[in-house]
Image (cartoon, rainbow, N blue to C red):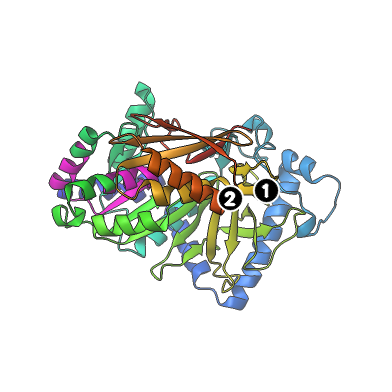
Amino acid sequence: MKIYSQKMLSLFDLSLKLNGFPIQKAKAELNRIVHLSEEDFAVFLQNKKDEIVDFHLKNNSFYKELVGNKTVPNWEDLPILNKHNLQKPLEERLSKGYTLKNVYLNKTSGSSGTPFVFAKDKYSHALTWASNIMRFGWFGIDFNHSYQARFYGIPMDFVGYQKERFKDFLSGRFRFPVFDLSDEILEKFLKKFKTKKFDYLNGYTSSIVLFAKYLEQKNIILNQICPTLKACFVTSEMLFESDKKLLEKQFGIPIINEYGASELDLIAFENTKGEWQVNAETLFIEILDENNKALPYGKEGRIVITSLFNKANPFIRYEIGDIGILDEKSTLQKPILKTLIGRTNDVAILPSGKKSPGLTFYYVTKSIIEDDGNVKEFIIKQTKLDVFEIEYVSEKELDSTQIQKIKEAIELYLEPNLNFTFTRKTVLERTNRGKLKQFKSYL
């Protein structure tokens, strides 16, 4: 299979080219940007920011209307674009010269609760792929030769399903659909690793963690049965330190954390030093306070991103809906994401008026609930100010001692007098793409 897949994978660059994405030109430009001196990079960044704003003010009526009558606005005066602004027909948001036929089209997953369709011009999308190729290359992964074990969802309609499988075939991927992760299915996954020469795993954090827990239960180290494995890349959901340790232990390979958004690009990608390096080549990242003022490195705020190359659709000072901190050691050319705290709409509002990232509940509960390996995964829902529902999948029901420990921990870390219900499930609800939403507020 490996020999066959390598032949197929030589089609990867070719398939991009045939679809109108100038990958060689994009790789050359990315290489040039990466090798700029610090001074030249600062000039490049300023020029790209000026260029992209100027282009959209002249060629995009949607963006011009958003900015208003300012003739040459300062960067800080430009509006913050949000997902609600983008929930209008794409034709109304496309720049002059771009149509539905000459752009790359896709839609966001809707995990933020605000899905929309977006476009990228073909060169901008080629740069996204060049950026992916470079970063995966840091770990010895070559999209033209490496074989991927892909833990993702898949469209269930016939046409969508076949299209996705064909893309997998061209891209040298074998897909493990994540909608059913029962032990019987995980056993089938395991058999594939015994018979196929995978080079790396890539996919949703929660699914890959569940697979690692299954291996732990069976006392199996993955790279001992699939010695070709080099690395595992997790995406789309929070990776906790304890889960990272579990993955390293059960897979026996480096675990790399990535953070991206389909409408933009890879936003941050763990480098070989273990730093979450921000993509400063095709994006400009700002951390803003509640008054839209830029915060210094080390301060927590809203993540706002500008796509420096996308001419088809403006993503200028675009609020992605996440909260994070850039490390104090960041530079303009090499920003480091110190912490990704979670989504702005995943904040729990408590009876006292205190606001707390929903993942705090998840994190505190997780530290207790998984002590004995009984609970496989769980989610937390806030239904009222003081009412939270915990749904979990486990071998056996949680006992009163465990429930009491969870309540005490939450009281310690958050506040007293919160009410919890615990419901054991056979399977947890995932999005239509297979993502697990770990915390959700229904307020």
Q: Which residue is identified by label 2?
A: 414
Q: Is residue 236 visible to the viewer in this orientation of the structure?
A: no
Secondary structure state at the residue bearing disc 1: loop
Is 425 rendered above or below residue 146? above
Residue 406: x %, y % from top left: 46, 45
Looking at the image, do the residues carrying marks 1 and 2 touch, with CB atoms under 8 Å apart? yes
Q: Residue at x 49, y 38 (%)?
A: 380
The quadrant in which the N terminus is found is top left
Which is nearer the N-term, disc 1 or disc 2?
1
Q: Nearer the viewer, residue 95 or 223?
A: 223
Q: Is residue 305 visible to the viewer in this orientation of the structure?
A: yes
Q: Residue at x 13, y 45 (%)?
A: 195
Residue 225 inside the magenta-drawn segment: no
Label at residue 354: 1
Residue 178: x %, y % from top left: 33, 36
Q: Which residues are magenta?
A: 188-212
Q: Nearer the viewer, residue 270 or 325?
A: 325
The amino acid type found where label 1 is placed reads Lys
